Amino acid sequence: MKVKASPKKQSKGGVSVSSSNIPPINHPIFCLRHLHSEYHLNNCESDEKEALINQMVNLSQFSWDELKLKPKHGMGSEKIRVSSLHAKIPSTLTPDVEHVLAFRFSGKKPFVGIRNGSIFHVIFIDRAFNLYDH
């Protein structure tokens, strides 16, 4: 992949990426913009934050198709019905969303969100195992 500084954005720290040099993306890209305030990264201990980042790095080495074949308590995911969540549902989860996906980190602690194409939007970090019935 080629990354070059954009002359217009350079003063603001931006970069420009030539889309002709980027292969199609079929691996998870993690977004933390929509984290729920009660299940936020700020509530995690340092070792949990480190484990979460390490797991995201590990997961991003596989394609979405490969991850579908992995065990749910390993590198794979588990579908959870939105109706079974104990937290207030944020507006990020529109009424048409019936399921969220849970990946594991730091043992079996789940981080939960929705997939939109290659992007996985992390909404909940369930470090206390109280987001849904396990």
Image: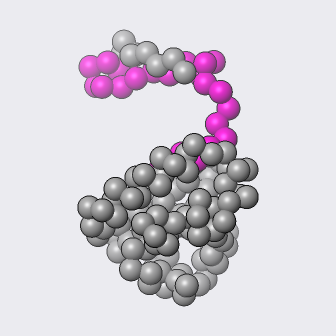
Q: As drawn, is 1 to the left or to the right of 81?
A: left
Please provide percent x and percent y for residue 113.
54, 64
Q: Does residue 99 appear anywhere in the picture?
A: no
Please provide percent x and percent y for residue 65.
73, 50
- Magenta-drawn stretch contains 16: yes
Q: Which quadrant, please, contains the N terminus?
A: top right
Q: Residue at x 51, y 66 (%)?
A: 104
Q: Residue at x 66, y 71 (%)?
A: 79
Corner quadrant of residue 100: bottom right
Residue 42 versus residue 66 in the image, above or below: below
Please provide percent x and percent y for residue 117.
65, 48
In this view, the residue in front, 5 or 30, is: 30
Q: Which residues are magenta?
A: 9-31
In this view, the residue in front, 82 or 52, is: 52
Residue 56 versus residue 102 in the image, above or below: above
Q: Does residue 62 appear anywhere in the picture?
A: yes
Q: Residue at x 36, y 12 (%)?
A: 7
Q: Residue furthest top?
A: 7
Residue 60 versus residue 49 in the image, above or below: above
Please provide percent x and percent y for residue 78.
64, 70
- Magenta-drawn stretch contains 29: yes
Corner quadrant of residue 73: bottom right
Q: Which quadrant, please, contains the C terminus?
A: bottom right
